[in-house]
Amino acid sequence: MKRLTAQLLLFSFLIAFPVSFARAQRTLAQPNETLIKNATVLTITHGTLSNTDVLMRNGKIAAVGKNLNASGNARVIDGTGKYVMPGIIDCHSHSMLDTINEGTLAVTSMVRTRDVMNPEDVDLYRELAGGVTTLNLLHGSANPIGGLNTVVKIKYGRPASEFLFPGAMPGIKFALGENVKRSSTPNQPGVQRRYPNTRMGVEETIRDAFTRARDYKTTWDEYRAKVAKGEKNLIPPRRDLQLEPLVEILEGKRYVHAHCYRADEILMLISLADEFGFKIKTFQHVLEGYKVAKEIAAHGAGASIFADSWAYKIEAYDAIPYTAAILTRAGVVVSMNSDSDERARRLNIEAAKAMHYGDLTEEQALKLVTINPAIQLGIQDRVGSIEVGKDADLAIWNGHPFSVYSRVDTTFIDGEVFFDRQADLARRADLAKERTTLEQAEPNKPPAAGQSPQRPRGRRPSHVDDDIWEGDQP
Amino acid sequence: MNARRGDTATARGGEVFAAVILIVAMASISFAQQIGNPTTQQGVLPPRGTFVIRNAHIVTVSGADMDNGSILIRDGKIEAVGPSVNAPAGAHQIEGRGLSVYPGMIDLGTSMGLVEVPQGANGTVDTSEVGELNPNAKAYVAINPHSAHIAVTRVDGVTNALSSPTGGLISGQSALINLLGTSPREMAVVPYAALVINYPRIGGGGGGFGGFFQQQAGNLSDTLAANERQLEQIRKMLRDAEAYGRARDAYKADPKLPRPDANVVLESLVPYVRGERPVIFRADREAEIRGALKFAEEMKLKPIILGGDDAFKVASLLKEKNVPVILTGIFSLPNAEDDFYDQLYESPSKLQQAGVRFAISTGDSGPEVRNLGLYAGMASAFGLSKADALKSVTLYPAQILNVADRLGSIEPGKTANLVVTDGDLLEIRTHIRYLFIDGRQVPLTSRHTELNEAFKDRK
């Protein structure tokens, strides 16, 4: 009976699998149980365990301990000499976003990064190869109040909807300082400059938005109170999609992730938030945060920072790589982030930098890319450490993740393999052959001198106002 | 000064006002000096001294490691290396038990000291001169010895940098410097070390932001035609310089000949067209590297490739022509969507296997150069041996620039550019304990350590 169940499970996996394959390497059928044996397990919350097994079942961490048993059809991985670490969480990412800034207005809380997710971004795969499993997809830093974020698991090869992290707290991007001010100058001549252009105007923009949001909330609260009392013939107030996310912030239902650099603008935003009665969940970059550590700690904000980037613009000139240590010791929850598809691949080393600069312990440094960003995103109940009951989002490394000589072997999300180095290497010969075949195909040959390259046949009509696709056109 | 008319009280008030202004100004200057002017940027060059490091693990790079070895530093040089050395009287003794000694790292792909803050402080940017052909733009005359980047970089074990201009077709001349000195002269190792040419780009993608600034991938033959026109500009100037050099020498030998007018531009090119000094070609794509090699051969130049993302695809040609490559793309995203994820991590290993000479560089203008060791370490995670990874940031760059008689390994007679650590130099968890440049002990302070001290205990 057990064998039949196993076969049925296998069969249902096979037919449930999507027919169209994306570029990611794919195993035909993923077992729902995986046992990693005899590895060094970096649990993050319960220390480092040597010669320990990790059992994953049905997408969760089912057991952590010595000499675990798994069922007959489990995939078994020999973890001898390997390290198992929770999947890295990047708290500041713009991966897979076709566009990151709706920079035309100073307040764009109505736009959503979720609407521009491109699941075929190959850099997602490259991040998986660096042991990253979760991203906080943020709007850019052009606006004092930017768009809504999306927290995703990097399920490369799946449709965008399957990337969404279940139950993640909604969030929004704020931005202060130079990037906002630089966005005040338009690219085209003759176009009016956008307010604000100074840190004075940045404050007023946010103040004004929350003032309107507060009034909007009052209007709706009064309306709902009347409805509750049973009043009839009421006209609901007009909805405002820009203000609704701000009301959510006031009600503690949406996290604010605020990009900032200078110490004074950090204090400005804390003061403003205190005045309106809401909290900043994280300061992003916050490179001068070390100058105002106690104020950040007192407010209860987290900090999501670069390990050691500095001097690329004037507000980053005072940045120092000791910030993680200073803020951690002040009691701030600190994460290391990438803000870069390239740097996202090596967040393990970025976290280790906190041991080099500022002498954080290994335990403290490991938290910077695991449980801390999880806390900052409100997903710490599901990810960020290796504990029974949490999602099976983890990576197997062939050495300690803080060693520059280490590499990721395999990356799991919800117990499924989304990156495996051996599988990647095994495909390369076939891919090289496929590439050669494609290069020699007639339409791909380089054109004769003077000719433009032959454009691929279009699959949509080219006129812009066409909103009905009528199929392949000649 | 005319006697002031008007009533005395106003005149006195004016004097008091001026005095107050002066006092406030002086107070604000001294306040600024407390926070904003770390001593590492002041004009103090540590003196050359006599030092003995004892009982350390010595990684000579050029030979076998030495457990429990000693080094004698004197007059700016490594005087002796061995299981024991004779310590002269008065030598500073450094206990090296549990510590390792390495040669200082060398980054050949920087613009160190030529740019302080690229965005928002344009006045500090001196990398790229106006116009396409600037062989006489010399990094050496524009490097700011008090740039904050210099101390920040050396305290993590990078003791030397090749600082190069950028932009145009012929960017200018690079300077090889020690990352210590209160004046350019004090810093100079080779003031005019190489000419830098940007080989005309072919194809799109690449660049510092990994394709963010996409080039229009136009018609290939149009691109090649445009490139040929640019190469012709360079070619013509190089030929003019060669002719100028001959005319100048002929006049020197025989002053009865017509005197050629001095020309600073052509004058600067003469050593390069005569093959006396190397020419660095920035080139990443395969077609660019091939083009650069062909051009160098035609014009009888001594080429070095800088960039080299695709160098592993042209390895046999590079080996045949014995052209070294300074790899700057270790921490870049692979250019094409279908490139393998570790293509650039692995390229040093591929060059090593093919017998091509190479060095690893951050390719950064300044702030990231301190991470040079990590670039080498990553290459080692993907195939390069640890020993070769270390060589790629020490001995190999010294050899490529022909200064291996002075730098790149721990051998008697070489300059005492040394880093003493508590572990593997390439690992980020390692700490630097002592630093020597030119046989001077360098304090392990920088703008960053000083800002840390200023704020870490703020209550």
Image (cartoon, coloured by chain):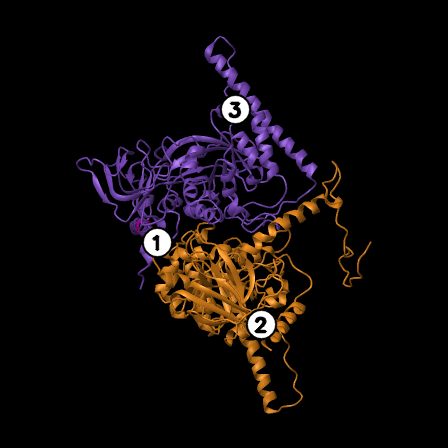
Chain colours: A orange, B purple
Tell which tag, 1 or 3, sits nearer the viewer.
3
Viewer-nearest residue: B288 or A180: B288
- Amino acid type shown at disc 3: Val
Q: Give the range drawn in magenta.
A: B26-31
**Distance of label 3 from label 2 (alpha carbons):** 67 Å
Tell which tag, 3 or 2, sits nearer the viewer.
3
Check if residue A391 falls in the magenta segment: no
Residue picked out by circle 1? B451
Q: Mark 2 lies on which chain?
A: A
Residue A341 at least partly seen: yes
Q: Give above or below for A223 relative to A212.
A: below
Same chain under badges 1 and 3? The reply is: yes
x, y percent for residue B235: 59, 26
- Discs 1, 3 touching: Cβ within 8 Å: no
Q: Give above or below for A172 relative to B353.
A: below
How dense is the environment of label 2, judged by Cα within 10 Å: few (below 14), some, or many (20 and up)? many
**Distance of label 1 from label 3 (alpha carbons):** 47 Å
Q: Which chain carries label 3?
A: B
Instruction: Give SS at disc 1.
Output: helix
- Amino acid type shown at disc 1: Leu
Instruction: Give SS at disc 2.
Output: loop
Residue picked out by circle 3? B273
* Numbered label attached to residue A243: 2
Task: Determine whether, in the image, residue A355 is placed left or right of residue A456.
Answer: left
- Discs 2, 1 touching: Cβ within 8 Å: no
Instruction: Give SS at disc 3.
Output: helix
**Distance of label 2 from label 1 (alpha carbons):** 40 Å
Check if residue B29 falls in the magenta segment: yes
